[in-house]
Image (cartoon, rainbow, N blue to C red):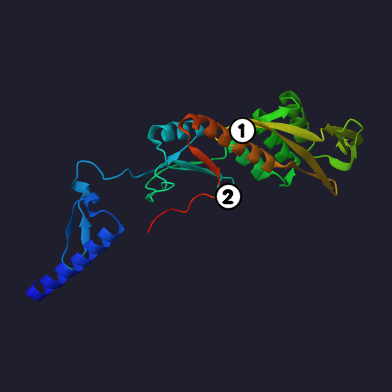
């Protein structure tokens, strides 16, 4: 390197150091070296300890989230609760800005995103989807553990009846006074035609855990039917599943707020922070 280049490098390094001194205390910086060209390279990785905590932890349930935050909480820690349906997150920024002091780097964060259970994904995924009576029967029987009412025995009986009537000609559907649907059909056995009927409840109720780590909630569903010619088409519609999502989110928020109350952590309903990078 020529003498001229050395001088330019030193001048550029001086400018960078002056900038650092203007925006903060250079004595608090990690060890660094000035590279040819004036670039500053940190030597923090060679220190015994980092200069500050840096971590972005993804937790799986509210209990783990509370435990982690309590372990590292300080007077600036804030939890942001974002109930937007596409997010459903709880983000703790351990090193949030000081209220009347310096800005912080937000390098230490803990995040909990509510994760739908497989059962919830199955039921919401099939809601409104038209099925053959055999497919509907199989789906009900496969998911009996999630059905709170009517009884599992009745659901099995209904599903097996539907499966056994896959070759009949459905004629009409009548709603009875007790709220059940009566599906009337004609069946031919040994060249003899006879009429019959299948009775199915108007509604059924799920007892379902919407998110990993959440409690179970009741969710009502309507049986739906359509007779296309002589073929039966079936489906179900979940009634206001968004209410269950809202209640489960609010329950988690209340649990986190109660768990962190003694540490006086601020818990805010707000959009998830976007970050504090430069």
Place of residue 95 in the rendered image (x, y in percent of width and height, measured from the top left): 39, 44
As helix, strand or loop, the secondary structure at mark 1 comes to: loop
Label ID, residue 67: none
Residue 209 located left or right of residue 137: left
Closer to the eye: label 1 or 2: 2
The residues bearing labels 1 and 2 have C-alpha atoms spaced at a distance of 18 Å
Is residue 237 or residue 2 the one in the foreground?
A: 2
Place of residue 82 in the rendered image (x, y in percent of width and height, measured from the top left): 56, 46
As helix, strand or loop, the secondary structure at mark 2 comes to: loop
Q: Is residue 148 visible?
A: yes
Query: What residue is drawn where x is 27% and y is 63%?
Result: 19
Residue 268 located left or right of residue 229: left
Is residue 103 or residue 67 the one in the foreground?
A: 103
Q: How many marks on residues?
A: 2
Circle 2 residue = 86
Query: What residue is drawn where x is 38% and y is 35%?
Result: 72
Circle 1 residue = 209
Q: Is residue 38 visible?
A: no
Residue 16 located left or right of residue 128: left
- CB atoms at circles 1 and 2 under 8 Å apart? no
- Give the image quarter of residue 181: top right
| In the image, farthest residue toward the bottom | 4
Place of residue 154 in the rendered image (x, y in percent of width and height, measured from the top left): 76, 26
Is residue 99 or residue 77 the one in the foreground?
A: 99
- Give the image quarter of residue 53: top left
């Amino acid at each position: 390197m020529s003498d001229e280049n050395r001088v330019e490098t030193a001048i550029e390094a001086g400018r960078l150091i002056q900038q650092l001194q203007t925006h903060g205390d250079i004595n608090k910086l990690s060890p660094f070296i000035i590279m040819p060209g004036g670039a500053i390279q940190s030597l923090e990785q060679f220190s015994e300890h980092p200069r500050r905590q840096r971590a972005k932890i993804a937790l799986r349930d509210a209990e783990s989230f509370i435990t982690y935050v309590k372990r590292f909480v300080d007077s600036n820690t804030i939890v942001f609760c974002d109930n937007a349906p596409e997010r459903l997150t709880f983000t703790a920024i351990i090193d949030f800005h000081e209220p009347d002091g310096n800005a912080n780097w937000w390098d230490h964060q803990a995040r909990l995103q509510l994760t739908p259970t497989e059962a919830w994904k199955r039921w919401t995924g099939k809601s409104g989807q038209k099925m053959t009576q055999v497919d509907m029967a199989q789906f009900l029987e496969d998911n009996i553990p999630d059905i709170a009412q009517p009884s599992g025995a009745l659901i099995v009986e209904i599903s097996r009846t539907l499966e056994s009537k896959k070759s009949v000609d459905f004629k009409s559907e009548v709603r009875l006074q007790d709220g059940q649907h009566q599906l009337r059909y004609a069946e031919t056995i040994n060249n003899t035609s006879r009429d019959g009927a299948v009775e199915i409840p108007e509604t059924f109720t799920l007892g379902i855990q919407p998110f990993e780590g959440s409690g179970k909630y009741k969710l009502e569903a309507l049986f739906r039917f359509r007779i296309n010619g002589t073929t039966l088409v079936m489906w179900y519609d979940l009634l206001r599943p968004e209410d269950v999502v809202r209640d489960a989110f609010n329950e988690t928020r209340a649990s986190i707020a109660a768990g962190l109350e003694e540490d006086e952590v601020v818990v805010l309903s707000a959009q998830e922070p976007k970050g504090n990078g430069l």
